[in-house]
Amino acid sequence: MSGPLRGIRVIEMAGLGAAPYTGMMLSDLGADVIRIDRPRTRTAKPELYALSRGRRSITVDLKRAEGLDVLLRLVERADLLLEGFRPGVAERLGFGPTQCMERNPRLVYGRMTGWGQTGPLAPTAGHDLNYQALSGALSLFRRPGGRPVTPPGLVADFAGGGLMLAFGLVCALLESRASGRGQVVDAAMVDGTASLTTLVHSMTAQGRWSEKPGVNASDGSAPYYDTYEAGDGGYLAVAPIEPAFYAALVDGLGLRLDELPDRSDPANWSKLKRQFAEIFRTRTRDEWAEHFAGTDACVTPVLTPAEAAEHPHNTARETFVQDFGVTQPAPAPRFGRTPTRIAGPPPIPGQHSREALYDWGFAEPEVANLVNSGVIEQQER
């Protein structure tokens, strides 16, 4: 293991979406993350599921008293635990915060849910789109006269949820090192996504943002902050907000700034956008990208994920890596003295049951008994 979290022990209760992203982040930063999988867990090509990278997997039957005891003994040696069940499920299964902190008072217990542990929606189901909607974020992804777009599950699940939980866990861990006491981190995706909208609330209070789409400078309404279609059907992201950068855009389009309508007047935006759009359709996406390369016009090609991995800037920084047969983002952020790396490929459920238990203090004879009795499973890769 390498990275700033080297030496930190984490238990991740297997789940979907945002919580596994938290586990990936902690592993990428050097933590020893053990994932507790359910018995007889079978998924298609788990060895290619990059979101599970860098962890070791133990398959434990938590419905048996011996299996629950295995988990609680691991808790005694852990710094962090994270789970993504609905409120009350972990308690019913016997490993809620109270049960775990009785074994380890210094434990930081992270809980990932969509609606949070409290509130009228806490026990109900939901997904990324629902959490964006209720936080106010989804209304920002809308064009005049159109409905909100449906973005992939990145905003609420991963930014408002997974990243927020990782941040909260590390903050609580720092505090526990000083106080000697653990605590619960309640990471609700709706809370985290709402936090991402702080700028909009600030600008609204200042009178610089309207809830009506089509009149705000950074919601795709301004000619200097939008996407434009190129002649080959590709798109360019155009974002020269500052006057000097806007001047570089205008010059690159072959126009004269003093001959254009005043961009600071929203009444001129439609005319400017039509004029810019007509010019952008005269070349391909990549021709425009090359034309503006090295300038401050803030023009970049809209790339697919596969194209992004091949872009010269990303390859120079090794933003993406090819590991265990999968092209994927490298660990982020970067650290000068404690560099990070992917700790290993995604595990097969139960692949490390023996190995991880040995490393976390279990004796070889008792591990053999647990395997023979079916309390834990050992799977071969």
Image (cartoon, rainbow, N blue to C red):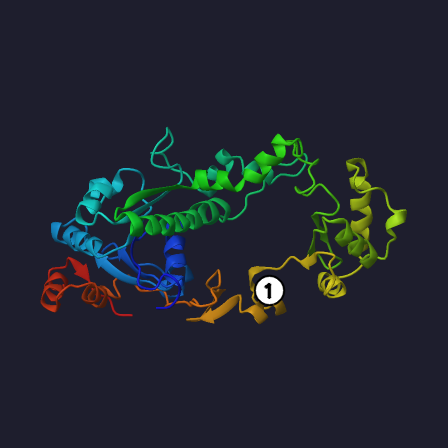
In this view, 248 is above or below 323? above
| Mark 1 neighbour density, 10 Å: few (under 14) some (14–19) many (20 or more) | few
Give coordinates of residue 236: x percent, y percent.
70, 55
Q: Residue furthest right?
A: 259
| Count of labels in the image | 1
Give coordinates of residue 109: x percent, y percent.
29, 47
- Give the residue displayed 78% in from the left and 61% down from the top: 283
- Whether residue 180 is visible to the viewer of this picture, yes or no, is yes
Q: Amino acid at mark 1?
A: Glu
In this view, 363 is above or below 124? below
Q: Is residue 113 left or right of residue 196?
A: left
Q: Residue furthest front?
A: 178
Q: Nearer the viewer, residue 277 or 34?
A: 34
Residue 282, picture quadrant: bottom right
- Give the residue displayed 43% in from the left and 41% down from the top: 189
Residue 150, picture quadrant: top right
Give coordinates of residue 377: x percent, y percent.
20, 62
The quadrant in which the N terminus is found is bottom left
Q: Nearer the viewer, residue 123 or 217?
A: 217
Q: Is residue 366 left or right of residue 86?
A: left
Q: Which residue is mark 1?
A: 307
- Give the residue displayed 37% in from the left and 30% down from the top: 119
